[in-house]
């Protein structure tokens, strides 16, 4: 008698849980967000192939992949920051400022300029990280502040003027060159993705990025130095933004203090498209790779089909909202860690 | 005796802390007077008040949203989209009666009343939509409004065809931006003040206030105590959209034109004002009065910087530093209070 009642009450307690239906099975198939992303990418490419065959011309492919790699590199740093539950709005300004500071040394040769650009990006990212980790300033505010501080400093440093990149072969090679028939940005982007993937999956500090993002306090009590991780990811975000800078600058043969404007939003859009949650601890860098490809090809197909640049913006925004909506509601609140 | 002194000192400290924004404002006025002879002239003050009102109205809406632990990045784009969409709607409506609204390519000549009403309706509807997607579809507001930032800007370009619309031939439109009450106080500043006072009173003396603060502080607890959190969140977004609509009217009325690229970056400036005013990102803390003061403070800072003769680049640097410093100081204050208990 008692037993039965207990059983009934336990059953009741489980009543609200979802039953296994076709819907849950379908969810399980798609719960691997990477599969979903691959599916979306193939749909995008198929539609592009049918309506705009020019997409698959070698020259167009190289162009798309080059731009995808440059924006994707910034998005890669953004992904790492988002995984720890923080956000970095300053990556665009970091790109501008580090480009301009590196540009001061253009007379001394490409090598110095590139080295200083990278150092500057790393340093600016670390400043963000230290303020967020030790100053406990919310990252949204800190990087919103540095977005305008770094952006202003870039203009002050360059006195609002552009510097032209004539005869700087190494500098231009980073954006326009080829390694084994592949554009240099693509090679760099892919290798960074692979390094980050290996780092995240197989190394202890890489795993701790997720722990810090999932539960700050729990991570802290488990003896993980959350501060160090946060400083590290912000530093990396700065470094990647600075790395993308010269590649982007050499596309137009000049270094200007306005070059990075808007990159932060594209980077966040790509990271989120790739399945990274802005609440932290969900997503991975392979997703970011796929997200960047979807983003790049979609925009390319749109501009080739003559819909117009204005429509691109609209679709970019709609895509962002819809994909997060799908991730939130169809996949539920779980996903690939 | 010593105790008494200590208590007096404590009271003084409390007073300073409570009125920190007011003190900052007064010291800024002092700095302004000291740094430039043209600072304390009626003309300059009119300029300050006018420049304050657009961003101020925008920041009031943003405050409501941020009190509920949300954020609205779309207000800048909405400031371009709402009037352009309103003009298109007015054109469509009045073409039924045979009146041509847009003449000579891009001169708006008729339909003042409809344009104003449609601007309000469109901006409130966009706010409602954002709130709906945030609350019902559980998409974080950061993402929804980031997406809307693109969508609204793009749609504004499509509707306007990319070229500016001139409102110089629209009778009465420039009244809001140029009229002076008592020959001195700009009309748009009075409008800003009126909305601010209304918001302050609503939050303080009606049940709206406690409900919004409760939702922002701890949504779960608020829901379990019978607060309709979803309703208040959507309401906050509608208010934010509505404020963006009014801000766009002030802005366009000043310039007598509407452009798809207008008010780019205003979302960040509005967040800056809200944050300086003491509303934290964690929600449930902050006041509309703080935002009102912060808007004037930011206006004063920008004015002083340009009077001193620093280029606009330094403005962005200084504003960025102020945002960071403000949040840093507020957080220290809050943490100390929490430590004490």
Image (cartoon, grey):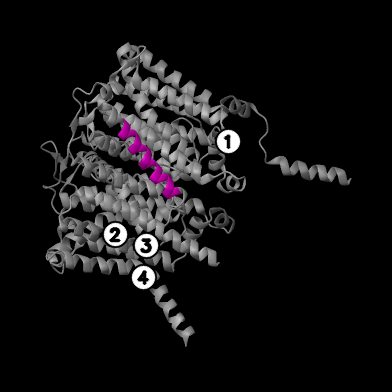
Label 1 and label 3: CA atoms lie apart by 37 Å
Looking at the picture, do discs 2 and 4 lie on one chain? yes
Which residue is denoted by mark 1 in the rendering? A334
Determine the CA span between mark 4 and mark 1: 46 Å
Q: Are marks 1 and 2 on the same chain?
A: no
For label 3, the residue is: B288
Could you say which quadrant of the image residue B109 lies in?
top left
Which chain is home to disc 1?
A
- Towards the viewer: B168 or A135: A135
Q: CA distance from mark 1 to mark 2?
A: 41 Å
By secondary structure, the bulk of the magenta-drawn segment is best described as: helix
Place of residue B303 in the rendered image (x, y in percent of width and height, measured from the top left)? 19, 58
Percent of width and height locating residue A323: 45, 32
Q: Is residue B99 visible?
A: no
**Alpha carbon distance from label 2 to label 3:** 11 Å
Q: Are marks 3 and 4 in contact (CB under 8 Å)?
A: no
Q: Residues within 10 Å of mark 4 (few under 14, many from 20)?
A: few
Dot 4 lies on which element?
loop
Q: Earlier in the sequence, mark 2 or mark 3?
A: 3
User: Which quarter of the image is occupied by the C terminus of chain B?
Assistant: bottom right
* Position in image of residue B108 (x %, y %): 15, 43
Q: Which residue is mark 4?
A: B19
What residue is shown with label 2? Answer: B295
Q: Which mark is residue A322?
A: none
What is the chain letter for disc 3? B
Question: Which one is nearer the viewer's eye here, B190 or A136?
Answer: A136
Q: Which residues are magenta?
A: A115-132
Query: Does the magenta portion include B261?
Result: no
Q: Are marks 4 and 1 in contact (CB under 8 Å)?
A: no
Q: Depth-wise, is mark 4 or mark 1 nearer the camera?
A: 4
Mark 2 closeness class: few <14, some 14–19, many ≥20 residues within 10 Å = many
Of residues A213 and B269, the one drawn nearer to the viewer in this rendering: A213
């Amino acid at each position: 008698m008692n037993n039965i009642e207990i059983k009934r009450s336990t059953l009741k307690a489980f009543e609200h849980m979802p039953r296994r239906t076709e819907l849950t099975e379908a969810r399980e198939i798609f719960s691997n967000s990477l599969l979903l992303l691959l599916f979306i990418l193939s749909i995008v490419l198929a539609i592009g192939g049918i309506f705009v065959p020019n997409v698959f011309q070698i020259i167009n492919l190289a162009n798309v992949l080059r731009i995808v790699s440059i924006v994707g590199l910034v998005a890669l740093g953004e992904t790492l920051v988002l995984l720890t539950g923080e956000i970095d709005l300053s990556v665009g300004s970091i790109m501008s400022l580090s480009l301009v500071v590196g540009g001061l040394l253009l007379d001394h040769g490409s090598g110095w300029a590139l080295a200083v650009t990278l150092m500057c990006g790393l340093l600016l990212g670390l400043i963000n990280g230290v303020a967020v980790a030790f100053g406990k300033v919310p990252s949204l505010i800190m990087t919103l502040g540095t977005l305008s501080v770094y952006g202003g400093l870039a203009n002050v440093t360059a006195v609002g003027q552009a510097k032209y990149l004539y005869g700087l072969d190494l500098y231009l090679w980073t954006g326009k060159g080829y390694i084994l028939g592949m554009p240099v940005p693509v090679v760099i982007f892919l290798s960074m993705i692979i390094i980050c993937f290996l780092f995240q999956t197989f190394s202890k500090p890489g795993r701790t990025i997720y722990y810090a993002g999932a539960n700050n306090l729990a991570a802290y009590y488990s003896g993980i130095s959350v501060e160090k991780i946060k400083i590290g990811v912000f530093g990396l975000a700065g470094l990647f933004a600075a790395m993308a800078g010269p590649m982007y600058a050499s596309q137009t043969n000049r270094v200007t203090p306005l070059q990075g404007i808007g990159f932060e939003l594209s980077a966040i859009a790509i990271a989120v498209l790739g399945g990274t949650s802005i609440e932290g601890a969900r997503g991975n860098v392979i997703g970011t790779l796929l997200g960047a490809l979807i983003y790049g090809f979609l925009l390319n197909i749109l501009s080739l089909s003559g819909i117009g640049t204005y429509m691109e913006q609209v679709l970019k925004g709609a895509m962002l909202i819809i994909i997060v909506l799908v991730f939130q509601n169809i996949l539920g609140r779980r996903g690939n860690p | 005796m010593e105790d008494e002194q200590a208590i007096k000192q404590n009271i003084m400290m409390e007073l300073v802390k409570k009125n920190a924004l007011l003190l900052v404002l007064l010291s800024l006025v002092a700095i302004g007077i000291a740094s430039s002879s043209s600072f304390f002239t009626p003309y300059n003050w009119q300029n300050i008040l006018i420049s304050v009102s657009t961003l101020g109205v925008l920041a009031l809406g943003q405050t409501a949203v941020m009190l509920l632990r949300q954020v609205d990045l779309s207000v800048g784009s909405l400031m371009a989209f709402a009037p352009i969409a309103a003009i298109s709607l007015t054109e469509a409506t009045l073409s039924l009666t045979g009146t041509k609204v847009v003449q000579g390519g891009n001169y708006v000549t008729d339909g003042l009343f409809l344009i104003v009403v449609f601007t309000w309706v469109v901006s409130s509807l966009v706010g409602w939509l954002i709130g709906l997607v945030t609350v019902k579809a559980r998409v974080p507001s950061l993402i929804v409004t980031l997406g809307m930032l693109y969508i609204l800007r793009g749609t504004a370009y499509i509707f306007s065809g990319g070229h500016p619309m001139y409102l110089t031939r629209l009778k009465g439109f420039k009244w809001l931006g140029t009229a002076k009450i008592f020959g001195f106080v700009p009309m748009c500043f009075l409008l800003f003040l009126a909305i601010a006072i209304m918001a302050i009173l609503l939050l303080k003396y009606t049940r709206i206030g406690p409900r919004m603060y409760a939702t922002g502080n701890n949504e779960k607890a608020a829901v379990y105590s019978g607060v309709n959190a979803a309703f208040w969140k959507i309401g906050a977004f509608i208010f934010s959209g509505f404020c963006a609509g009014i801000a766009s009217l002030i802005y366009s009325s000043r310039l007598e034109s509407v452009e798809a690229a207008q008010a780019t970056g205003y979302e960040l400036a509005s967040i800056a004002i809200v944050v300086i005013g003491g509303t934290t990102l964690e929600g449930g803390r902050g006041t509309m009065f703080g935002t009102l003061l912060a808007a004037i403070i930011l206006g004063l800072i920008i004015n002083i910087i340009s009077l001193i003769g620093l280029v606009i680049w330094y403005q962005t640097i200084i504003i960025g530093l102020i945002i960071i410093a403000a949040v840093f100081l507020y957080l220290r204050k809050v943490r100390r209070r929490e430590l004490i208990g």
